[in-house]
């Protein structure tokens, strides 16, 4: 069990202390969406369905498929970098 | 309540002590085993214990078994009692009650202890005088820890809890607090040490920080100074730097928003620069000196974190410049006949002053051939003409940082700084026909209305001359100013450093 270390907030405290999310996309029109299979059973089937529904939106979406070597570890840095360069958004299949 | 006591362990003052009266006193004795005077006076402590019984409480700072002859010693190794009673020296004997004001003595002065306790034979076999030792509450770094543990906290900033398994550096990055380089995690202990370097209240508002126009407390400045890597003794200079940046004449808001290169350049004058070990010599504008590096960075982090000014957000610089991490140095004031930048701004040589200039990067003036002031003026003027653009005049101010070798040429010829400035102004006056738009086949330039005029390169007060750098090398420097210099934008501002 870990203890906590206190840091004092250096900001104006106008924002909540939680880490901010990156700005969300306003539209998927013309965007590239990555589908990341974390390599759990039936993740591929789930993401196949997600891909089908994305393409059915008629928004000129390009879909890239990726997979982690194993769900037991965090994604390799190289895979993260590849997705960040090639995609505007990513959907990760977490459950089996 | 803090009892009156002197700062010196050498000279306890008996004259301020209240006389013993007929009332019933109680006593508190603070000792530590690692104090030769406490060990020497142990027989006297035992006498006090025998005489006063439960009216005497003995607190041991380092060993509850000391004094070994007294079994009821109270364990104060946590130092709470010592801290709450502001003990600075051991042994200290506090006397309370008896219808008298509380009083204390410290160290060992036999006559004084006898008078204070009313025991004429106290310590009769002991030497007449021995100074005490420092209280453990004042061991290095301990006092701030005790302030956090037992004192009334003056830290009002939001406390964020981070798992100790998390990398604190990464936690700071993740929260967007850094300029891209690692920061020192702002723990309460570090911030308290920073705040203790000034007498100013932690919740005092030092000013309104752009671009979000947020009221900024001294505490927030301290947090960012910690993150920048400042030592506490730099803090008065950091505070002066922030005060200067928030002066209306400096126009920090516009400076942050501009697409131009400029950013605050901090120049420190006066005794404080030496006190905190700033570099005005070899590589003065470069890396390697902690005070130079961190004071400028503290301002940048404050603007980012408190003001909300981040690149790509309100900071719209097209290219920026490396000085936006930090750009801070002190002036070489080793020549008593040569006025410093602060003196040009109306301060005295003995004043500690922070000057802020909205400047860009460093442009070299390499002249290793000139040996007369006239040649050197021509040489420097040629380089100064390129400030902002060779055909843009009266647009950007500039710092001219003379190296030692170049300044020596002027000084040996009997030239003052004002002589240099006047000569440069004259050398830079240019026929408007050369610099109007279209002249030389170049669209950029001054308005056509200036074609028939002689035009100054700099506005009055727009060229600031100072000195820095190593003793060897005929290499002076220009720091170009913001293209919105002067009253319409930013002017060089200066303010005294307090608390030194």
Image (spheres, rainbow, N blue to C red):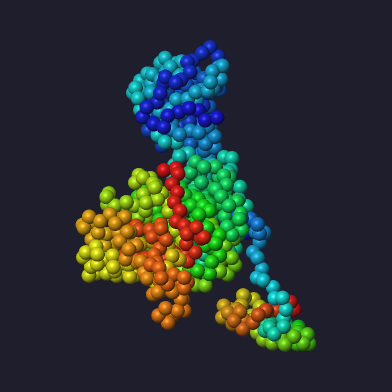
Most distant residue in the front direction: B452
Q: How many marks?
A: 0
Which residue is at the front of the view, A74 or B272? B272
Q: Position of B158 compared to B147: left or right?
A: right
Question: In which image quadrant can residue B33 be found?
Answer: top left
Q: Residue at x 28, y 68 (%)?
A: B378
Residue B196 vertical placement versus B440 (above, below): above
Task: Decide if residue B294 is in sight here.
Answer: no
Q: Position of A44 compared to B156: left or right?
A: right
In the picture, which quadrant includes the C terminus of chain B?
A: top left
Q: Residue at x 43, y 54 (%)?
A: B355
Residue B106, how many percent across, how many down? Answer: 43, 27
Residue B369, how many percent across, how many down? Answer: 22, 70
Residue B44 vertical placement versus B227 (above, below): above
Which residue is at the front of the view, B478 or B303? B478
Task: Decide if residue A64 is in sight here.
Answer: yes
Residue A46, how many percent across, how many down? Answer: 76, 83
Q: Position of B181 compared to A6: left or right?
A: left
Q: Residue at x 37, y 27 (%)?
A: B11
Question: In which image quadrant can residue B469 be found?
Answer: bottom left
Residue B306, how many percent across, how many down? Answer: 58, 56
Residue B450 vertical placement versus B440 (above, below): above
Q: Position of A65 compared to B202: left or right?
A: right
Q: Residue at x 60, y 51 (%)?
A: B215
Which residue is at the front of the view, B19 or B387? B387
């Amino acid at each position: 069990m870990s203890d906590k270390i206190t840091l004092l907030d250096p900001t104006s405290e106008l924002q909540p202390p939680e880490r901010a999310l990156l700005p969300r996309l306003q539209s998927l029109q013309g965007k590239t969406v990555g589908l990341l299979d974390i390599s759990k059973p039936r993740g591929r089937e789930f993401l196949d369905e997600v891909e089908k529904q994305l393409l059915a939106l008629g928004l000129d979406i390009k879909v890239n498929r990726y997979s982690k070597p194993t769900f037991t570890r965090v994604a390799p840095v190289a895979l993260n970098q590849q997705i960040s360069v090639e995609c505007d958004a990513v959907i990760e299949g977490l459950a089996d | 309540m803090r009892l009156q006591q002197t700062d010196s362990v050498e000279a306890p003052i008996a004259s301020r002590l209240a006389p013993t009266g007929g009332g019933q006193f109680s006593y508190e004795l603070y000792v530590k085993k690692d104090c030769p005077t406490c060990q020497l006076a142990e027989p006297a402590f035992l006498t006090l214990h025998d005489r006063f019984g439960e009216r005497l409480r003995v607190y041991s700072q380092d060993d509850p078994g000391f004094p070994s002859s007294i079994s009821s010693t109270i364990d104060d190794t946590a130092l709470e009692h010592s801290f709450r009673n502001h003990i600075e020296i051991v042994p200290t004997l506090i006397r309370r009650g008896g219808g008298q004001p509380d009083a204390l003595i410290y160290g060992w002065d036999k006559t004084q202890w006898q008078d204070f306790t009313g025991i004429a034979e106290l310590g009769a076999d002991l030497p007449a005088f021995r100074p005490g030792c420092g209280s453990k509450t004042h061991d290095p770094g301990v006092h701030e820890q005790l302030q956090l543990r037992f004192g009334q906290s003056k830290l009002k900033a939001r406390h964020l809890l981070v798992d100790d398994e998390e990398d604190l550096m990464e936690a700071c990055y993740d929260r967007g607090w850094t300029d891209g380089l690692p920061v020192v995690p702002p723990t309460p202990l570090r911030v308290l040490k920073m705040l203790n370097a000034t007498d100013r209240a932690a919740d005092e508002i030092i000013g309104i920080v752009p671009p979000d126009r947020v009221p900024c407390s001294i505490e927030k400045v301290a947090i960012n100074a910690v993150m920048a890597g400042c030592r506490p003794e730099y803090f008065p200079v950091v505070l002066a730097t922030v005060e200067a940046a928030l002066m209306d004449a400096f126009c920090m808001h516009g400076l942050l928003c501009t697409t131009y290169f400029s950013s605050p350049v901090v120049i420190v004058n006066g005794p404080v620069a030496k006190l905190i070990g700033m570099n005005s010599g070899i590589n003065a504008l470069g890396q390697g000196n902690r005070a130079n590096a961190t004071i400028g960075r503290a301002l940048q982090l404050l603007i980012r974190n408190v003001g909300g000014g981040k690149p790509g957000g309100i900071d719209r610089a097209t290219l920026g410049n490396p000085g936006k991490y930090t750009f801070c140095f002190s002036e070489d004031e080793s020549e008593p006949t040569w006025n410093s930048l602060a003196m040009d701004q109306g301060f005295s040589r003995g004043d500690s002053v922070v000057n802020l200039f909205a400047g860009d990067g460093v442009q070299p003036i390499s002249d290793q051939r000139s040996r007369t002031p006239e040649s050197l003026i021509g040489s420097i003027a040629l380089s100064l003409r390129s400030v902002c653009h060779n055909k843009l005049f009266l647009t950007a101010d500039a710092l001219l940082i003379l190296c030692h070798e170049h300044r020596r040429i002027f000084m040996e010829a009997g030239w003052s700084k004002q002589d240099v400035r006047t000569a440069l102004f004259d050398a830079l006056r240019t026929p408007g026909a050369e610099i109007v738009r279209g002249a030389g086949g170049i669209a950029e330039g001054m308005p056509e209305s200036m074609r028939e005029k002689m035009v100054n390169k700099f506005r009055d007060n727009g060229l600031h001359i100072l000195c820095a750098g190593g003793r060897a090398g005929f290499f002076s420097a220009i720091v170009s100013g913001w293209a919105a210099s002067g009253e319409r934008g930013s002017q060089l501002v200066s303010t005294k450093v307090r608390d030194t």
